[in-house]
Image: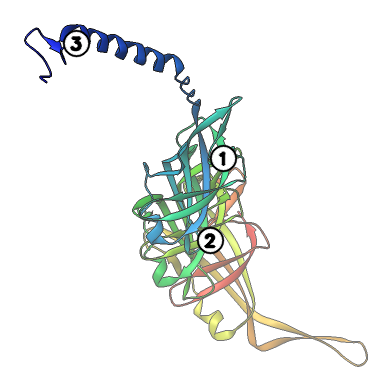
Amino acid sequence: MEVIDDDGNLFGAVNVVDALVVLVVLAVVVAGAAFVLADDPAPQPDTDTTYATLDLGTQPAYIVEAINEGDMYEPDDSSTLTVTDVHLTPRGTEIGVTLRAELQGETDDDTITYANAPPRLGRTLAIETSQYEVSGQVRDVGDRDTLAGDSQQVILRDTLDAETATEVTAGDEIRLAGRTVATVEEVATYATDSPDQTRVLVEATLATHREGGQSRFGGVPLQRGQSLTLPAADYTIDGQIESVNGNLQLGETSTRQVTLRMTEVRADTADAIRPGMSEGSSTDPVAEITAVETEPSLIIATGEDGSVNVVDHPVNRDVTITAELQVRETATGVQFKGEPLRGGTNITLDLGTRIIETEVVSIR
């Protein structure tokens, strides 16, 4: 039997056109039923973003060099972390890392959920990329995509060996993993009572970030007396903060006449101190001796009968020195070599052939 005969009937019974119409109607009916019977699509959850500061503690240099803005991590299908800011500081001999990160996750009653929990303060979050794996503690949450940072100027005091001290130069940059974190602005060096040691005052500008209302660098708040490390390429300053937002040029320079005294020094030392000796440049000395008076030290002995005998010491001498000192007049008083200059304090003078430690008797 032919499928379609000469009259256009299907199997000799149904007209082909009529059959096609029936099939089209059935298809529409089936599609409509499927649409009516289909389940409603599940609503998509609401998502939102917030920003968190993560303290990663100290990390090795090879890890730090791999961390960059734009790094992403997805702990699950509904959460995403993106690094938006990186802040590095020296912490001892290691590198401290603080990040700002964008956290994206689902919200419920205006509370964002990241990796199944809100990004609470103190919570530890992991970051895993193809290059590194680290974790950090949430220290702050807010709307900023960058760390609240600024620049702070500090004065640092340290004592270095004399050769290393000559390497400290204005303009030196402190760099960590390719990022500049501090710059040396000014340097002042002073002699100590040891010819191999030099006291250094460094004025430096630090790239800091604010946390809890305080500027922080190296993981600690910036304040007077705080220890701070600046690891330059050729040296390391490991000193104490003398002042915050201060500078080495504070106060005007002037010259004061000062009376100094040394007691019970050996005669050869006393004889070596002469007028005209100076510390510093010959054209602009820090200190210059103008007069020297030497007398034997006294020996006071008490006899068995209670009598007191005073005789000259055969070797030791007392030396009175008059000197012109270059000082700075500051709001808190006169300073010499960055230290307060007062009666009763000790100062050290490097006279080239001799380094002497003297007591300030009077200032005029």
- Name the residue furthest front: 1
Q: Nearer the viewer, mark 2 or mark 1?
A: 1
**What amino acid is at disc 1?**
Asn
In the picture, the disc for residue 344 is none
Q: Secondary structure at mark 3?
A: loop
| Residue at (37, 50) in percent of width and height | 180
**What amino acid is at disc 2?**
Gly
Q: Position of residue 178 (x, y in %)?
A: 33, 53
Lower sequence index among marks 2 and 1: 1
The answer for how far apart the CA atoms under marks 3 and 1 are is 67 Å
Instruction: Using the rendered view, name the quadrant where residue 22 is placed.
Output: top left
Q: Position of residue 141 (x, y in %)?
A: 56, 36
- Name the residue furthest right: 305
The answer for how far apart the CA atoms under marks 3 and 2 are is 106 Å
Quadrant of the image containing the N terminus? top left
| Residue at (20, 11) in percent of width and height | 20
Give 260 or 90, whichever is nearer the viewer. Answer: 90
| Residue at (45, 67) in percent of width and height | 278
Lower sequence index among marks 3 and 2: 3
The answer for how far apart the CA atoms under marks 2 and 1 are is 45 Å
Residue under pointer 2: 239
Q: Secondary structure at mark 2?
A: strand
| Residue at (58, 60) in percent of width and height | 258
Residue under pointer 1: 116
Instruction: Using the rendered view, name the quadrant where residue 108 is placed.
Output: top right
In the picture, the disc for residue 13 is 3
Give 357 or 144, whichever is nearer the viewer. Answer: 144
Is residue 221 shown above or below 77?
A: below
